[in-house]
Each structure stands twice: as structure tokens, then as C-alpha cells.
Image (spheres, rainbow, N blue to C red):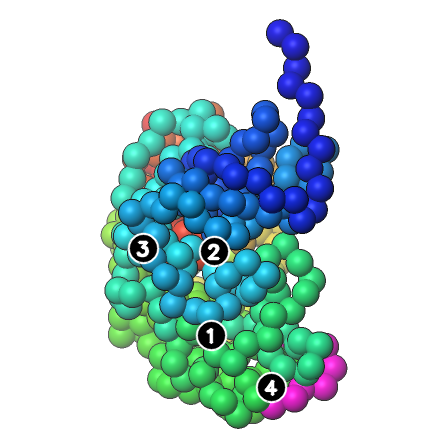
């Protein structure tokens, strides 16, 4: 069979295409004369006029500039910046919120089929607020060419200056912040706590607001640095904590590892469940986060804080009954998975913000004798392509 010759698109060229399936990364797949085009601002089943924005030897990227035949799931984007050549912070504002969750479910299933060679099914569950707006408590803003706060355009170093962000909690929509002219190019980091405190930091240093934020989750209290990692959705900590603790099913006296544990969101209920005869090892490489954790758990004798990379600290722990891991987007990887399974825990619960790395690691765990017996997705990043998954693996 003759290979299909490559179509030589040019940036700025306009084409009419049928929009195909959603793909990991916030875009949809279309084809024109055999060449793949990754399209933003479309929806599966639509016919659209698209404009080529980027070309490589294997594929092209494009934005929808006119919808010729619209999907029943298309809605008017609530934010004026959620458009071609606009802000890249959101991917799906033009998609009805329940269909966004269906798209994310399809992405997870496709990633597991392709990368893990596993056939799965799951639900992607929405949380409040129901409209998918005003949920984000942590934001990093870039500084635009006019000194105003903004966000990067999609796959670009160009900053789109904005006067508000509709996915940020309403407390961040302060005209004094957006209208001020900021000097320099350091990003502005804004954090709002569950107690209503707001901190503004720049270059890792606090410039306004309290230098310690107070978070309360299901009765547990945390005092943390504004730049330490914390789940960004207002409902994420309580939603994830409840399910994670149910899946861990800890017993009095258990020895547990909380890998990539941050300031210890999950360590607190773990310490309660294992009791004074048990042990919780929190492993985290961020020095700032572990300094917070040391203060939070200074009176919890069953908690040991390891300020180290997981692959360095985990092999030194001799007894492990259960493991929880909540790694960054890159996932755990082969070395960490091998170390986990060598410890022979009865249960591994994996919290993931990237279905591709989760699928890769799930294949490694399955091959090592751990069976995926529960998985659910949470739409903790509405309007964006991101999705949170919680998966439980038990030893066969």
C-alpha cells in the first residue's frame, strides 16, 4: 500500500474539516487529505472552518474560526478570553459542562486502551460549583507586555492580559490587582484559603496577605505556606480525602506510606486511622512543604516526615502495609513502581492528575501482580482538559 504523502499546510491557511474524537491535551482530531490536525475550540461531530496555527512534519494544529455545523453540546463560552488567540487557561468553555465530563471519560478510556492495553470503564463525577466556574483557589499569573496580569495563550509564550478569571474564586477578582501595572516578569502567585485568607507572592516571597494560610478539611486543620502545593479546587481536598480513606481501608497498627505527600493532606486522617501503634511515612521532596508538615504533625508520634525524593526514601522503609501516592503530572515511573511492589503492600491507592501517566503506571502495576479493582474520575478542573483520577490496586 502506498504511504499517504504529507500535505504541506502553511500557518494561516484555512480549511473546512469534520471534527473527530477528542484527544488528550484539550483538542480534537481532524484529518485533511490524510494528515492529522489537532483542533482547538471544536467538538466531535462538528463541521468547521479552521485556521492552521502550527505545522510539523507529522501533523498540524489549528483553531476553529467558524462553526458550519454545530454540535448539540456547544454553548457560548462564558469568558471573553476563551477564544482563538485568547487565553490558554481553559480548553472546554465552549462545551456544555456535563459533556465536558463525558469527553474526559473518553480520554481516560482511550489512554488506558492505548498505553496500558487495558479495557476499563468509569464515571467522571462533577463537584460543586455546578456551573464549573469560580472554583480555583491557586493561580499563577504571568505579566503581559503592558505590565498587566494575564495567562499564556495555548502552546505559546505570548501573554493574554485579562481583567478577571472566571474559574478563579471570586475573591481573586479584585480590580486593584488586575488594573495595577506590575514591573518585572516574575509570575504573581495568588492563594486563597478555606478560611478566606488571600496571599499574593512573587518569586517565592510573600508580598501581601498572611504568610501562613489556614485550611480545614473534614475536621482536620492545616497551617501551610501560601506557595506549598495544595489542591486548587475548593472541593478537592474533602472530596479526595473521603474516597482515598475509604479505599485505603486502614487498620489499627498499619504502617502506611504517603508518597509525594505534600504538606500532609492525607497524612492527617491516616495517622488517626492507624493509631499510636501504627506508622505513617510522609515522603515529599519540597523542602517548604515538609517544613509545613513538620509543624502540622509535631505532636503526632506515629508520623515520620521524609524530606527526600520518593525513589531515595522509599527503599529505606522496611515495613509497608498500604501505600498512597499522589505524584505530579509525570506520574511515578518504573523505578518507584518497582520499589512499591517490592515492599508487597496489600493495597496501593493512586491519585493522578494525568490519565496518560496513570495508564502507563497501571500497566506496570498489573504486570507486577497488582490488580486495578476500582477507579473513578473527578472533574476537579472544569473548563480545562485536566481530570483527577483515583485508582485502587490490590495484590493478586
Secondary structure under tag 1 reads loop
Q: Which residue is mark 2?
A: 91
Label 4: how many Cα within 10 Å (few below 14, some 14–19, many 20+): some
Start-end of magenta stretch: 180-187
Q: Is residue 212 left or right of residue 349?
A: right
Q: Mark 1 or mark 2: name the one nearer the start of the chain.
A: 2
Secondary structure under tag 2 reads loop
Closer to viewer: mark 3 or mark 4: 3
Q: CB of mark 1 within 8 Å of CB of mark 3?
A: no
- Seen in the picture, residue 144 relative to 13 is either above or below; the reply is below
Label 2: how many Cα within 10 Å (few below 14, some 14–19, many 20+): many
Q: Compare residues 130 and 38 and report the one nearer the observer.
A: 38
Q: Is residue 12 left or right of residue 77?
A: right
- Seen in the picture, residue 195 relative to 5 is either above or below; the reply is below
Rounded to the nearest angstrom, the CA distance separating label 3 from label 2 is 12 Å
Rounded to the nearest angstrom, the CA distance separating label 1 from label 4 is 21 Å
Measured as percent of width and height from the top left, residue 209 is found at 51, 91
Q: Which mark is residue 165?
A: 1
- Seen in the picture, residue 137 relative to 314 is either above or below; the reply is below
Check residue 182 for magenta coloring. Answer: yes
Measured as percent of width and height from the top left, residue 62 is found at 58, 46
Amino acid at each position: 500500500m502506498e504511504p499517504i504523502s504529507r500535505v504541506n499546510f502553511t500557518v494561516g491557511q484555512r480549511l473546512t474539516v469534520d471534527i473527530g474524537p477528542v484527544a488528550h491535551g484539550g483538542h480534537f482530531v481532524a484529518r485533511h487529505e490524510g494528515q492529522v490536525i489537532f483542533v482547538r475550540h471544536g467538538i466531535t461531530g462538528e463541521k468547521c472552518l479552521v485556521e492552521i496555527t502550527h505545522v510539523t512534519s507529522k501533523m498540524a494544529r489549528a483553531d476553529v474560526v467558524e462553526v458550519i455545523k454545530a454540535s448539540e453540546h456547544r454553548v457560548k463560552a462564558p469568558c471573553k478570553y476563551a477564544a482563538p488567540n485568547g487565553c490558554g487557561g481553559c480548553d472546554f468553555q465552549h462545551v456544555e459542562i456535563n459533556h465536558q465530563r463525558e469527553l474526559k471519560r473518553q480520554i481516560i478510556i482511550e489512554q488506558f486502551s492505548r498505553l496500558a492495553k487495558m479495557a476499563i470503564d468509569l464515571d467522571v463525577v462533577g463537584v460543586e460549583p455546578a456551573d464549573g466556574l469560580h472554583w480555583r483557589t491557586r493561580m499563577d499569573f504571568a505579566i503581559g507586555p503592558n505590565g498587566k496580569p494575564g495567562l499564556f495563550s495555548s502552546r505559546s509564550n505570548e501573554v493574554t492580559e485579562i481583567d478577571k478569571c472566571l474559574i478563579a474564586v471570586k475573591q481573586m477578582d479584585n480590580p486593584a490587582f488586575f488594573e495595577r501595572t506590575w514591573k518585572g516578569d516574575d509570575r504573581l502567585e495568588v492563594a486563597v484559603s478555606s478560611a478566606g485568607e488571600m496571599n499574593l507572592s512573587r518569586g517565592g516571597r510573600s508580598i501581601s496577605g498572611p504568610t501562613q494560610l489556614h485550611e480545614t478539611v473534614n475536621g482536620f486543620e492545616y497551617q501551610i505556606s501560601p506557595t506549598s502545593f495544595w489542591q486548587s479546587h475548593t472541593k478537592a481536598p474533602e472530596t479526595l480525602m473521603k474516597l482515598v480513606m475509604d479505599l485505603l481501608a486502614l487498620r489499627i497498627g498499619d504502617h502506611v506510606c504517603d508518597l509525594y505527600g505534600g504538606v500532609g493532606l492525607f497524612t492527617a486522617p491516616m495517622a488517626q486511622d492507624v493509631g499510636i501503634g501504627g506508622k505513617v511515612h510522609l515522603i515529599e521532596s519540597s523542602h517548604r512543604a515538609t517544613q509545613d508538615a513538620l509543624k502540622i504533625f509535631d505532636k503526632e508520634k506515629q508520623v515520620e516526615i521524609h524530606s527526600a525524593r520518593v525513589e531515595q526514601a522509599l527503599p529505606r522503609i522496611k515495613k509497608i502495609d498500604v501505600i498512597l501516592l499522589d505524584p505530579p503530572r509525570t506520574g511515578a515511573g518504573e523505578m518507584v513502581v518497582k520499589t512499591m511492589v517490592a515492599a508487597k503492600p496489600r493495597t496501593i491507592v493512586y491519585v493522578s492528575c494525568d490519565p496518560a501517566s496513570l495508564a502507563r503506571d497501571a500497566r506496570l502495576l498489573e504486570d507486577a501482580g497488582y490488580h486495578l479493582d476500582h477507579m473513578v474520575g473527578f472533574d476537579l478542573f472544569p473548563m480545562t482538559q485536566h481530570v483527577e483520577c483515583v485508582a485502587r490496586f490490590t495484590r493478586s
